[in-house]
Amino acid sequence: MKILVAVDGSSYTKRMLAYLAAHDEWLGSAHDYTVMHTVPPVPQRAAAVLDRKVLKEYYEAEAEKVFKPIRSFFTRRGMRAVYLGKVGSAGDLIAGEAEKGGYELLIMGSRGHGALTGLVMGSVATKVLANCNTPVLLIR
C-alpha cells in the first residue's frame, strides 16, 4: 500500500507514530511510505530581501528538525521512507500531495478540537478532509 504520513513534529505526531508502532498491520516492507512536513512560508517582505540559497537552507533545516526523530523511528523498525518537505499551507499541500501522488492512504495526527473551535479556527485535518479524496486515518 502506498501511504502518505503527514507530520508536524508535535505531540500529535508522536501519538500517531505510537499508534503505528502498536498496530503491526501498518508497519513493514509491504507498504511504501512518504513522510511529509510543511513549513510555513517566510513573509514575502522578508523573503524578498533574503538570498534564495539562505531561504532554501532555512526551509530544509526546519523540515529536518521534524524529520530527524521520525527517520529514527522508521529505521529502528527496519522501514524505509521517502521524506518530502514543502513550503506553504499545510492543509492544501497535504491534500494536494495525497491526490497527485496516488496514495492509497493518508495518516496524520489530529489535535481533536471540538466542532465549534474547528469551525471558528479551522484546522489542517478539516482542510485535508474537505479537499482530499484519499482515505484519511486521523489519530487523536
Image: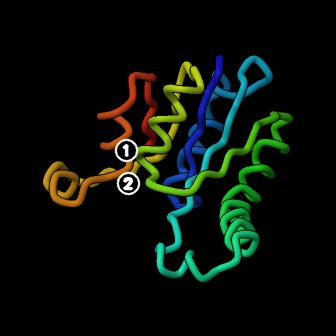
Q: Residue 72: where, in percent of width, then height?
A: 80, 52
Taking 19 as reference, is 92 left or right? left
Residue 33 to residue 54: above or below: above
Residue 34 to residue 48: above or below: above
Crowding around mark 2 (Cα neighbors within 10 Å: few <14, some 14 to 19, many 20+) is: some
Q: Residue 134: where, in percent of width, then height?
A: 45, 23
Q: Quadrant of the N terminus?
A: top right
Q: Amino acid at mark 2?
A: Arg
Q: Nearer the viewer, mark 1 or mark 2?
A: 1
Residue under circle 2?
111
Q: Residue 29: where, in percent of width, then height?
A: 80, 22
Q: Determine which of the numbered discs, if any, sits on residue 74 in the image.
A: none
Report if the CB atoms under discs 1 and 2 are less than 8 Å apart: yes
Q: Amino acid at mark 1?
A: Ala
Q: Determine which of the numbered discs, if any, sits on residue 125 in the image.
A: 1
Q: How is the image coloured?
A: rainbow
Q: In the image, what residue occupies the spot 32% across and 52% down?
A: 123
**Which of 76/91 is in front?**
91
Q: In the image, what residue occupies the spot 67% across and 26% down?
A: 24
Q: In the image, what residue occupies the spot 55% across and 19% down?
A: 104
Residue 56 to residue 138: above or below: below
* Corner quadrant of residue 133: top left
